[in-house]
Image (tube, grey):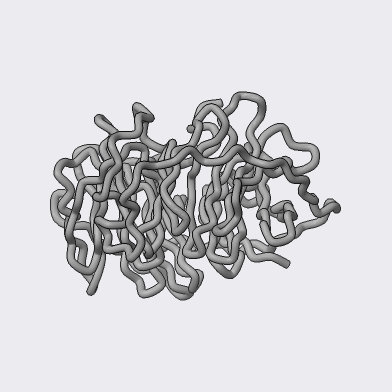
Amino acid sequence: MSSDLRRIYPAPSTRLLLLTMGAALLGAALGSTHAQNSAPIPAPRAQSARATTVPGSGATFTVQGVPLPSGFRHAFALALNNKGHVLFVAHKGAQARADDGDVLHLWTGDTPRALPLPRGFKTGELASSVGRSCLADDGRIAMNTFLGQGALFYSGGRFTPIAFPNLDIFIQNCAPDLSAVASDLNTAQSYLWTPTTGEVRQGTFEGVNDINRAGQFVADIALQRAEGTFTVDRKQWQPKFINEAGLVLGEDVAGDGATLYLWPAGEKQPTQVQRPAGTEAVFPQDLNEKGQALVGYLDDQFVYTHATRTYRPIRVTGWKLQVVLALNDQGWVLAQATQTGQKAVRTVLLKPK
């Protein structure tokens, strides 16, 4: 299954080759108090676990549409924070596609506010950009633009370019403090960016996916957290997210049908979690600080809670979900949807009933 079938923001292609990992690992580069000085060790094989799927057919989430700014006809979601604020792109044209009519907006509960990009930056392709854009709870933004433009940092009411070595480097994810990991689309080289200083450092691994504030990370075939640095057999699974507690969320890539892999901090081995009842596959889209994962494939979307090993289906009335994008610590889901009987693509917040 190709990644573009299950993610609106596909990860960059990589050679999936782990480079030499010594003392200058990601944790050390970002000032982690626990940098690993020994060689990585193989991750243990996963144990299997059953999971419960909440039954029923009624709506499980309410829908709150993010207002369309005056004069715009479509909206494309980019990022969500824990306050329920949304970063999105609004489009004026009759077709739901990206072009030069797109304008970046921030919605904080009232009228959406346009955020003009620096001179020379094209906004028309923001909605189709690869990678991931991040919105911190304090309103700062780290965002991708598109090929040939580079990533931007928003703070104090203005955008400034992030000083990556070239314009083909895209942010993959951010910690809650907006520290970000990024990858070069052409070489798969990883980079580490610190918002407080603006410093960019080159990583010593490829295929970076996520980071937490402690500098612990997950990459395509490696992960680091308090217990150590591990290589991961990509024939079995691939790490995608890590939260502040060190919980790692990944996906099955063995080719026998995707399932979730979770590895809580302190446990001796990861767990391969049974798919939701009635589904053919499930892929991770996001992980919050409460150990909840946003997961799904095609029309089947769920919030998985690891503490109870329970899948809660995302069902709504009056809307057709197109894609789910992000999950905050309140359990709210950022999504794209169309209202029944209408063609306009909307950015929506889904809130558990």
Rendered-image quadrant of the N terminus = top right
Residue 150 visible here: yes
Nearer to the camera, 245 or 14: 245
Say above or below: 45 vs 142.
above
Residue closer to the observer: 16 or 230: 230
Which residue sits at x=60%, y=47%?
A: 269
In x, y percent, where is residue 343?
Answer: 57, 44
Residue drawn at x 32%, y 57% is 35
Spot occupied by residue 275 in the image (x, y as percentages of width and height): 72, 40
Q: Is 120 drawn above or below residue 233 in the view shown?
A: below
Number of numbered discs on residues: 0
Furthest toward the front, the residue is 38
Q: Is residue 174 left or right of residue 234?
A: left
In the rendered image, residue 17, in percent from the top left (x then y), is placed at 35, 29
Residue 134: which quarter of the image?
A: bottom left
Q: Nearer the viewer, residue 304 or 265?
A: 265
Residue 118 lies, in percent from the top left, at 17, 57
* The quadrant where residue 15 appears: top left
Viewer-closest of 35 and 119: 35
If the image is split into quadrants, where does the C terminus sit? bottom right
Residue 342 lies left or right of residue 227; in this view the side is right
Identify the residue shown where x is 68% and y is 50%.
302
Outermost residue on the right side: it is: 56
Q: Is residue 248 left or right of residue 341?
A: left
Q: Is there any visible trace of residue 89 in the rendered image? A: no
Give the residue drawn at x 54%, y 47%: 285
